Image (cartoon, helix red, strand yellow):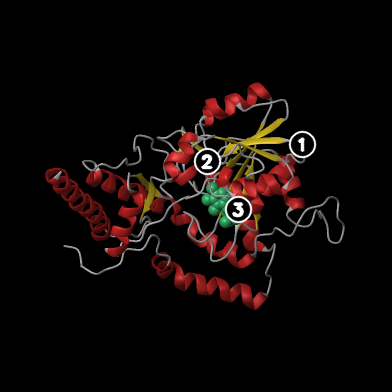
Amino acid sequence: MTTPGTEVPLVDLARPHARIKAMLEQEFDAILSGMRLFLGPNVQAFQDEFARYLGVSHCVGVADGTTALHLALRACDIGPGDEVITVSHTFYATAEAILLVGATPVFVDVDPVTFTMDVEAAESAVTPRTRAIIPVHLYGRMADMDGVMDLARRHGLRVIEDACQAHGARRNGHAAGTIGDIGCFSFYYSKNLGAYGEAGGVVTNDPKLAERLTVLRDHGSPRRYYHEMVGLNGRLDELQAAVLRLKLPELDAGNRSRRRHARTYSAKLASLPVVTPDLADDDHVFHLYVIRSHGRDALQKHLEKQGVHTGIHYPIPCHLQPACTAYGRGLGSLPVTERIGGEILSLPMFPELTNEEVDRVADAVEGYFATSMAVSTSVDAAS
Ligand SMILES: *Cc1c(COP(=O)(O)O)cnc(C)c1O
């Protein structure tokens, strides 16, 4: 039985906090009594722990995911005159990072089933100016990295993975973010691994890139008040690193819970006229559980009335954003991206969702189609 009138949030951060509260307060006390607030032992330890967790040799803590992407491009010497192939169906920061270094984003379409880069489309977008590809592991599902790496090798391109939604996703034993030249992570509070403010990380197996990233994130400064190159203030701070160290050991269990909720949703929604995510890939860590539905806006409104909070990730693709119109080829240029933008709906998803809540969400979706079908049947019957 579900409790009528109970709200189901899209994400609830209070529940995981309750688990780590006591330990975190101790950690914060220790940090605040020493007042070592940046580039101290917690940042160092988190970098080591996250690198070990992913199976990669270097992790550099940075200020946020956007900075991770920005600095990854800088570390690869990508700038004005260079083209970077990426998807338009992503959070805007992927494109923004390319624009921040003065390079040109070249947007390609996504696969309608996986929501990730259509590698054939990427191949057709390669020009003599192409320098890098940024695949996005959107919603927690890994992009076709075999395809991307093969393409990159054949054309001599850098690969920067946007793994901001795929902490701990693995395919054939390789974690998202560790396959290309550099992997970029956001620890924005609602990500699968989230801090309590802004935080991010960059990972690589290349010691030279790691060195450059370390210098770039700290004003291009390998030692105090000596600035070797133009960097920025992009450091991870000690308090956020302490939060991340406490949460990292829970990441795998959290991802398993997300997958379990996803399986339940998909089973319960199977007979409804919605497209549910493909569960065959075991590399999906369900940062978001996204369905596709005709009449999405009406469905969303219905769910909101039932106290089920949903999201749209994302309503306007990058190539149609005012900030990007100079770079895209306009409406009609990316048909899959443009179509799914009007159909996607993110249902509540976080590890601590209860079985009752998952049932309640699925029932509310079912209820919508029961009534809307009843309406359309009666309209048909009347006409
Ligand atoms: C969250 C996110 C980012 C940006 O991360 P911030 O920490 O918010 O700067 C970039 N790309 C994707 C796909 C994201 O989901």
Amino acid type indicated by mark 1: Gly
- Contact between marks 2 and 1 (CB within 8 A): the answer is no
Q: Is residue 312 left or right of residue 97?
A: left
Q: Earlier along the polypeptide chain: callout 1 or callout 3? A: 3
**Which residue is identified by label 2?**
176
What amino acid is found at the position of numbered circle 3 in the picture? Gly
State the residue in front, 291 or 177.
291
Q: Quadrant of residue 132?
A: top right
**Residue at the (63%, 76%) spot, across then down:** 32
Sequence order check: which comes first, mark 2 or mark 3? 3
Camera-side residue of 210 and 219: 219
Residue hosting label 1: 81
Spatial separation of the CA atoms under disc 1 and disc 3: 24 Å
- Other-residue count near label 3 (Cα within 10 Å), few / some / many at <14 / 14–19 / ≥20: many
Q: Residues within 10 Å of mark 2 (few under 14, many from 20)?
A: many
**Residue named by callout 3:** 65
Q: How many marks?
A: 3
Disc 2 residue type (three-letter): Ala
Q: Image point 60% across, 59% down: which residue?
A: 199
